[in-house]
Structure formats: C-alpha cells, structure tokens
Image (cartoon, rainbow, N blue to C red):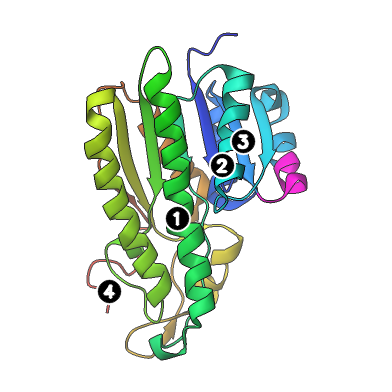
C-alpha cells in the first residue's frame, strides 16, 4: 500500500463539514476512515468520492462510547497500518434559547458529543500515534467562531467550543515530545444543511433578526487540507476562516 499522503480519521463524516473534508482528503491521496453514527450516510459519503472511494473506509459508531472509538482506531490500523491525521469534527448544536431555559439533559448530551467525544478520539489517536513507526501525527480539532465569541442565546454550544480550545492547547503541549501536533480550525458560517437558516435570518444580540453570509463548505475543507499537508514539524495552533461580512469581530 502506498500511503505517502498518510491515513486520516474523520469523525462526523456523514454530512456537512466532515463529509467535505473526508472527500477532499481522499481526492488529495489520503486513505480516509470516515466515522459517524449512520452507516447508510457514510456509504453515501464514500459513493460521492467516486474513483477515490477505494481510499475510503466507512465505520459506523458513536464518539461518546469508548469501545466504539477503540473499534474505530483498530479498524483504521488494520486497514491501513497507521493513523497520521485525526479530524475531530463530530458535534451538535441546540436551538437558540435563553440560558435559564437550557435543559440540563440537552446540555449533557451536547457536552458529551462535542467535548468528551473529541477527548476520546484524541486519546485513541495518541495511543496509536505514539506506538507507530515513524512516530507522531496531527490532530485537527474543529472549533468554531463560537470558540472566540458567543452567538446570542447559544450558551451550551459556546461553552463546548471554548472547551475545545483548551483541549487543543493541552493536547499540543502533551504531544510535543512524541511528534503529535494539535491544531484548531474555527469555521464561520460554512454552507451546510444546518446553516441554511442563516440566509433567512439569525437572531442578533440587539434583538433583531438579520441574514448572514455563508461560504462554500469546500473552502473550509481546503483549509483543513492545507493544515493536513504541512510538514510534521510545523503546527497551526489556530486558524479562522469565515465570510468577510459575517458578524464576528465586534459581535454583539
């Protein structure tokens, strides 16, 4: 097997940013292990890869379940021999609501998927990357513009993405001695199914509802691809990509 481009694990690869990144990596020559809860949606991702589908392995599972994550990385090593890249992408959002109305059960579910799931996948990646020869690899965590500033009435999601920033920094520090770099990409308003509402109007901190620009999801995938192709000794601690006119700097 020629794995000169390396082997990538992509979580949340059944739709949206995860699917776009999985397809971009496969087209660029990576072997890709696509992971999400629904096998049928993963098979669609593989089908969209066309001729590159031979470079893609679909594995269904749950990022919040330790055994499921362990099986994911076991499958990656069995199929391709190693893991060079983890794109920690799986995540969910909640409907906009005042902080006092956030259901604790919904809060726990979101934190479990967005934060604990990222930790479990990073742990598994560390174990593989430390043991393989040559040692090392790269983890790219999908943060958000909300890792910097909150969107109005999005307390749970904002908290989870600030936590991802802390996780990224901690992983970067611990990975330094064994050649594992950890990076974070913060994507604003990528044009995927769940952001369609942005073009109709988003609640703003002043109480108004205004449309926001979106960017093609391929631009976000290209940014991840740039980070993935850097030399092993180079890291991008943080990269922000967004439409120029979306509210970010000065949000609120």
The Cα atoms of the two marked residues, 1 and 3, are separated by 17 Å
Measure how far apart labels 2 and 1 are at the Cα level. 11 Å
- Residue appearing at x 30%, y 32% in the figure: 181
Q: Name the residue under label 1.
A: 116
**Segment tinted magenta in the rendering:** 37-44
Q: Where does label 3 land, which residue?
A: 71
Estimate the x, y position of residue 158 in percent, counting from the top left: 36, 69
Considering the whole magenta stretch, tell me its main secondary structure: helix
**Numbered circle sitting on residue 251:** 4
Q: What numbered label is drawn on residue 69?
A: 2
- Residue 170: percent from left, percent from top: 25, 45
Of discs 2 and 4, which sits in the foreground? 2
Residue 207, percent from left and from top: 37, 91
Q: What element carries label 2?
A: helix
Asked if 33 appears above or below 196 in the picture, the reply is above
Question: Marks 2 and 3: CB-CB under 8 Å?
Answer: yes
C-alpha gap between disc 4 and disc 3: 41 Å
Q: Do the residues labelled 2 and 1 touch (CB within 8 Å)?
A: no
């Amino acid at each position: 097997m020629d794995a000169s481009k390396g082997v990538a694990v992509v979580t949340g690869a059944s739709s949206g940013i995860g699917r776009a990144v999985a397809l971009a990596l496969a087209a660029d020559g990576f072997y890709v292990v696509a992971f999400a809860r629904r096998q049928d949606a993963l098979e669609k991702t593989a089908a969209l890869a066309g001729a590159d589908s031979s470079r893609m392995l679909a594995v269904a599972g749950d990022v919040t379940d330790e055994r499921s994550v362990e099986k994911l990385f076991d499958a990656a090593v069995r199929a391709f021999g190693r893991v060079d890249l983890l794109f920690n992408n799986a995540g969910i959002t909640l409907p906009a609501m005042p902080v006092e109305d956030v259901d604790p059960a919904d809060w726990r579910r979101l934190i479990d998927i967005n934060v604990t799931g990222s930790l479990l996948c990073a742990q598994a990646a560390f174990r593989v990357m430390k043991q393989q020869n040559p040692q090392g690899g790269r983890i790219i965590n999908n943060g958000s513009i909300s890792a910097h500033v909150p969107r109005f009435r999005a307390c749970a999601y904002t908290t989870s993405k600030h936590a991802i920033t802390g996780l990224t920094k901690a992983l970067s520090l611990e990975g330094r001695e064994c050649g594992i770099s950890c990076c974070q990409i913060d994507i604003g308003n990528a044009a995927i199914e769940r952001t369609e509402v942005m073009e109709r109007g988003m609640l703003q901190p002043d109480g108004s509802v205004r449309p926001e620009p979106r960017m093609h999801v391929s631009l976000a995938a290209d940014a991840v691809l740039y980070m993935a192709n850097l030399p092993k000794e180079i890291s991008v601690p943080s990269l922000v990509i967004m439409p120029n006119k979306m509210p970010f700097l000065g949000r609120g």
